[in-house]
Image (cartoon, rainbow, N blue to C red):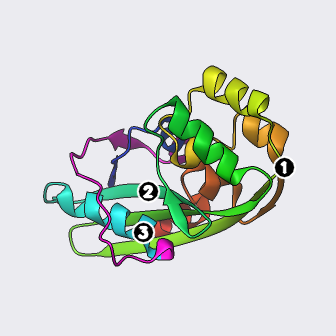
Amino acid sequence: MKLLLASQSPRRKELLSSLGFDFEVVKIDCEEILPDYIEIGEAAAYLSELKAKAFRSLTGDEVLLTADTVVAAEGQILGKPKDEDDARQMLRMLSGKTHQVYTGITIKSVDKTFTETDVADVELDEMTDEEINYYVQNYKPFDKAGSYGIQEWLGMAKITRLNGSFYTIMGLPTHLVYKILNEI
């Protein structure tokens, strides 16, 4: 099996490597636009499948892994922030509340496609404007859905409770990836 990871995320690369898989990183050019009708719980899987469909045809023993993470709070999806102000606004929305993190994965071979979503609930302690500014200025969370990374300062200092997989929140539900890849 020749595993192809279609992600530029250093976190996904690290996690997949830590699972013991050899893989090659590939790039997919895909406009990630959600249709208006999509349910929040289906968005991550939809985007993951969209990326898999945008990739070239697979050959022989190639297996493609795509993933997407969506943060949801107050009935809306929080994507990657556009700028510092957007990041601050998202973090204020999450402050002192519980939100959901959905990570969808698609694993595709020549003849089969598996798509799964895992969800975790994350409870954040209240954050002051000073703490939010510190985090945004020092950790530049512009490549992260919901404007934060669980493995960084905010995760260590402000997450008070998790219900679900830490790795799903980090961007790759490793337990699902491991199970499916071993089945293949």
- Return the disc, 3 or 1, that comes first in the chain's sequence: 3
Image disc number at residue 68? 2
- Give the mark, 2 or 1, whose residue is nearer the N terminus: 2
Q: Which residue is mark 3?
A: 43
Q: Is residue 15 magenta?
A: yes
Q: Amino acid at mark 1?
A: Asp
The region drawn magenta spans 14-41
In the rendered structure, find residue 125 and report the number of the disc placed on it: 1
Residue 184 horizontal side relative to residue 159, left or right: left
Which mark is drawn over residue 164? none
Quadrant in which the N terminus appears: bottom left
Which residue type carries mark 3? Ala
Q: Position of residue 168 (x, y in %)?
A: 61, 58
Residue at horizontal 67%, vertical 65%? Answer: 120
Query: Mark 3–mark 2 contact, CB under 8 Å?
Result: yes
The percent position of residue 101, horizontal first and vertical second, equals 60, 61
Work out whether mark 3 precedes mark 2 in sequence or the reverse, and give the earlier one. 3
